[in-house]
Image: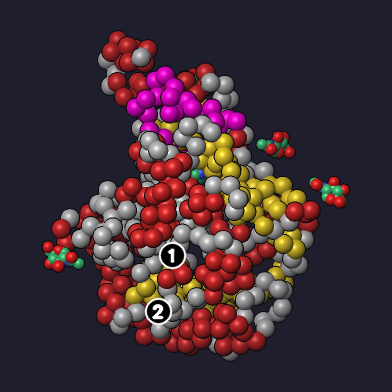
Amino acid sequence: MLGAIIAVLLGLPAALAQSSACCQTLQDAGLAHVLYPNSTEYANRTLSYWSVSAQLSPYCIVQPICTGDVVKVINTLVKGPDCSTTQFAVRSGGHTVWSGSNNINNGVTVDLGLMKNVTLDKNTSTALIQPGARWMNVYGALDPEGWTVPGGRAGSVGVAGFLTGGGNSFFTAKVGFACDNVKNFELVTAAGEVINANADENADLWQALKGGSGANFGIVTRLDMFAFQTGNLWGGTATYNKTETAKQIDAYVKWTDNVANYPDGSSIIFWSYLPTLADIVILAAYEDTAGNEAPAGFDNFMAIPRIGDTLRIDSHKALTDELEQATGYRDIWFTMTFNNDAEIFTKIVELNEAFVYKWKTVSADPDFVTQCMFQSIPTVFSKHSVERGGNVLGLDKVETNSIMLLFNIAVKTADEEALARPLLASYGKQMQDFAASKNGLVDWQFMNYADREQDPLASYGSENVEKIRAAARKVDPQGIFQTKAPGGFKISRVGTEAGAGVEARALFGRVAVDPEAMVNISNL
Ligand SMILES: Cc1cc2nc3c(=O)[nH]c(=O)nc-3n(C[C@H](O)[C@H](O)[C@H](O)COP(=O)(O)OP(=O)(O)OC[C@H]3O[C@@H](n4cnc5c(N)ncnc54)[C@H](O)[C@@H]3O)c2cc1C
Ligand SMILES: *[C@@H]1O[C@H](CO)[C@@H](O)[C@H](O)[C@H]1NC(C)=O
Ligand SMILES: *[C@@H]1O[C@H](CO)[C@@H](O)[C@H](O)[C@H]1NC(C)=O
Ligand SMILES: *[C@@H]1O[C@H](CO)[C@@H](O)[C@H](O)[C@H]1NC(C)=O
Ligand SMILES: *[C@@H]1O[C@H](CO)[C@@H](O)[C@H](O)[C@H]1NC(C)=O
Ligand SMILES: *[C@@H]1O[C@H](CO)[C@@H](O)[C@H](O)[C@H]1NC(C)=O
Ligand SMILES: *[C@@H]1O[C@H](CO)[C@@H](O)[C@H](O)[C@H]1NC(C)=O
């Protein structure tokens, strides 16, 4: 009210004045860390978003330091004076690459970056992890104790977004997705209540948080994970000339069908354009989580001549520090899933190369990076998920061993991003269309890799969409997290055009899973 009066007196737009006043209300509520654009801390937090595309300009950033602070933040943002029209965003690691998932212009960003404690309780084999921890903090705390949890494969990735988005780790073949290893989520609801979600308490919410994105339910303030003892792992990266493409594809298809027999193994391969080489090379990340050096499961890969490698016995942390990727770019990601089929795989690699050379004719800037990355999604993954209580990823409906693609480009400027987005989308669509033409397109998009124009929640199937909706309705009946916190993949937007661009969405050509839940894209 006061804010509105001041706005009139100063001639400011009412919404703007109210939002800055809302930041003051947060301070008045006793929150010590409210950062304004004129501070170096604000600049630091902005720069700490992995993708430049996600570096927006909120009115202020509020950093709670404990669950009680998060309650204050929520109560203020939802009911506080001068906050009624203020929207907000929630951010943990800040690794989602697209603009508006984890940050906001003309609003307040709740930044969990000061909540990053990691506590290991060996008696109950549980690691209690605060949401703003990065996986390097988690492994840094657990490695010296000889314990670990399944988590990010690049150390800088954040815990809460990763786990509530599913989380593919080195250990998925052994223990299911990382989210399947969350025993309990502590969550602050839109009503400012602190609740727990686990197998015994709020079990529906527990399942929904395993893949349904925290962004639909509240603010996750602690994640308790089943931890286990481990020694060092074997692994690292290997580099190959792109002339080895056919051999790599052959080895990877065989690998994918063998994952169920070799649950200690993990293999990711990608074709990457690197500015330093000005060409595409093949990179592979191999790991044996039991610490066996190049066991037989890797024979097909080991037989391919390589340019070099860093393969060795090392800690979980060291191996994930190594897989860090260049920051300082604007990133566009796209994901799809296809049958474990060499013909489709080969076509995608060819289309990726065509994309790279096309981009070179569109942009004069040689400083860009691309990845065309493949990860096995065999059916054994979701068997483990079901054993551990189930998640909402919907992979149990996929009956064939599959491969997930992450196809992406990193560019330097906003203009280039605007040019690259439709180009990447059109190549992504060609990849999808080819897979569909061979009856090999799998209707599943992994949220952690999905672009804002994709609809991963819809791809999890109507039953899971309904589970997520029901859990969201129950915990947040007013839909505060659907409207006042607009960022992220929202269950209320499944099958709608509410993402940023109908055009790009049409280009990506969404995969209809549940005709009733989907809007016919031809009619958008
Ligand atoms: C270099 C790199 C490596 C990666 N490696 C992997 C990998 O190995 N496996 C994999 O599965 N994925 C990987 N990813 C993808 C990554 O898991 C997602 O980007 C994930 O969202 C990152 O988590 P975050 O905490 O940083 O999320 P943020 O970007 O901070 O948040 C993601 C979404 O979750 C919401 N959210 C965040 N925190 C909370 C909270 N506490 N409560 C409620 N909602 C919240 C946000 O509002 C946002 O919508 C990688 C990404 C990068 C950039
Ligand atoms: C920064 O901005 C805030 C909010 O507008 C203001 O209260 C504060 O005095 C400013 N600090 C400096 C150092 O200018
Ligand atoms: C900002 O980050 C820089 C470099 O990481 C660091 O040296 C500096 O202390 C930080 N400043 C603040 C105010 O956090
Ligand atoms: C996190 O750890 C720090 C340092 O050990 C401690 O001071 C703080 O109270 C802890 N915070 C929470 C919420 O447990
Ligand atoms: C763990 O168990 C040991 C031995 O039973 C006991 O002494 C210790 O207090 C327990 N620690 C915790 C954190 O419960
Ligand atoms: C790959 O092999 C080709 C042909 O032998 C060679 O010209 C090229 O330099 C090699 N590339 C790398 C990165 O080694
Ligand atoms: C989508 O709409 C178009 C145009 O109205 C129509 O031809 C097509 O059959 C519809 N597809 C489905 C799956 O309903």
| Chain part drawn in magenta | 68-97
Q: Amino acid at mark 2?
A: Asn
Task: Please give the residue where the numbered disc 1 appears in the rendered image.
Answer: 394
Is 52 one of the magenta-colored residues?
no
Quadrant containing the C terminus is bottom left
In-image side of 292 versus 376 (left or right):
right
Q: Mark 1: which secondary structure?
A: loop
Q: Amino acid at mark 1?
A: Gly
> Which corner quadrant of the figure contains ligand 4?
top right
Number of numbered discs present? 2
- Residue at x-position 20% and y-position 60%: 520
- Of residues 99 and 361, the one nearer the viewer is 99
Which of the 4 quarters of the picture holds residue 23?
top left
- Residue at x-position 30% and y-position 63%: 514
Label 2 or label 1, whichever comes before in sequence order: 2
In-image side of 335 versus 511 (left or right):
right
Q: Position of residue 220 (x, y in %)?
A: 54, 43
Q: Position of residue 59 (x, y in %)?
A: 41, 29
Task: Please give the residue where the numbered disc 2 appears in the rendered image.
Answer: 339
Q: Marks 2/1: CA distance?
A: 16 Å
